[in-house]
Image (cartoon, grey):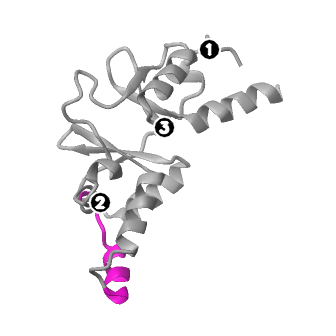
Amino acid sequence: MEFTDKIKNYMNPTVVYTSESERLADVIFKMSQAKTDMAVVKSNDTLRGIITESDIYYALVHKMFSKEMKKAERDKNIENLTIIDLMRGPPAEKVMASCETLGWHPCVDVFEDDPLENAIIVLQRSGVHHLLVLNNKNEIVGTLSAGDIIKGFRRTQER
C-alpha cells in the first residue's frame, strides 16, 4: 500500500441513493444488496446528506428505548420509519450528516485522483468516517470509508 495511490483504487464505486421519504427498511435492503454501509440522501437533485449503517443503528436504538412508546407501537413504527423520520429525531445531526451550509462541497468529500494520504488526513481531521468521492466534474463517483482503506490494504498484502 502506497499512500500516494489514488483514492479511486480504494473507493467503493457503488453509490446508493435514497430520498427523505424512502422507508428505512427499503434503504437498509438497498445498502445490503450493494454491500455498502452508507447511502446518499437527495431531494429534488439536491444533496441533503448521507446516512450510514451506524446512524441507522443508533436511531433505531433511540426509537426502541423511547419511553413515550409502547412496545406494539414501537415495533409497528420502526417497520414504517422513513429517512425523514430519522432526520427529525431529537439529535438529527447525529442521525444524518447534513450537507447544508458547509460550503461549496457541503458534505466531506475528496477527489478520485487525489492521493490516498489526502483521504486519510481528511478522515482524521474532520472526525467523519465516510467521504464522498468526486470526479473532476464534481459528480459523485463513489464513497470511501476507513473500512475501504483497510480492505484495500489487505488486497495489496495478498498480492
What range of the chain is rendered magenta?
70-84
Q: Quadrant of the N terminus?
A: top right
Q: Mark 1 points at which residue?
A: 5
Of helix, strand and loop, which mostly describes the magenta segment? helix
* Lower position in the chain sequence, tag 3 or tag 2: 2
Q: Name the residue under label 2.
A: 86
Determine the CA span between mark 3 and mark 1: 19 Å
Question: Disc 1 on helix, strand or loop?
Answer: loop
Task: Please say if 59 is above or below 120.
Answer: below
Residue 103: within the magenta?
Answer: no
Q: Which amino acid does label 3 sit on?
A: His
Q: Which of marks 2 and 1 is in front?
A: 2
- Nearer to us of marks 3 and 1 is 3
Q: How crowded is mark 3: few (under 14 residues within 10 Å), some or many (20 or more)?
A: some
Neighbourhood count class around disc 2 (C-alpha, 10 Å): few under 14, some 14–19, many 20 upward: many
Would residue 52 appear left or right of 105 to someone viewing this image?
right
Q: Which residue is drawn at 27% across and 53% down?
A: 92
Q: Where is residue 84 in the image (x, y as percent from the top left)?
A: 24, 58
How far is the residue under mark 2 from the one under mark 1?
37 Å
Q: Name which residue type carries label 1.
A: Asp
For the residue marked with disc 2, what is the amino acid? Leu
Kind of element beneath mark 3: loop
Q: Quadrant of residue 120?
A: top right
Alpha carbons under labels 3 and 2: distance apart: 19 Å
| Local SS, label 2 | helix
**Going from the N terminus, do you reach mark 2 or mark 1 first?**
1
Residue bearing the label numbered 3: 129
Q: How crowded is mark 1: few (under 14 residues within 10 Å), some or many (20 or more)?
A: some
Name the residue: 49% across, 13% down.
Answer: 114
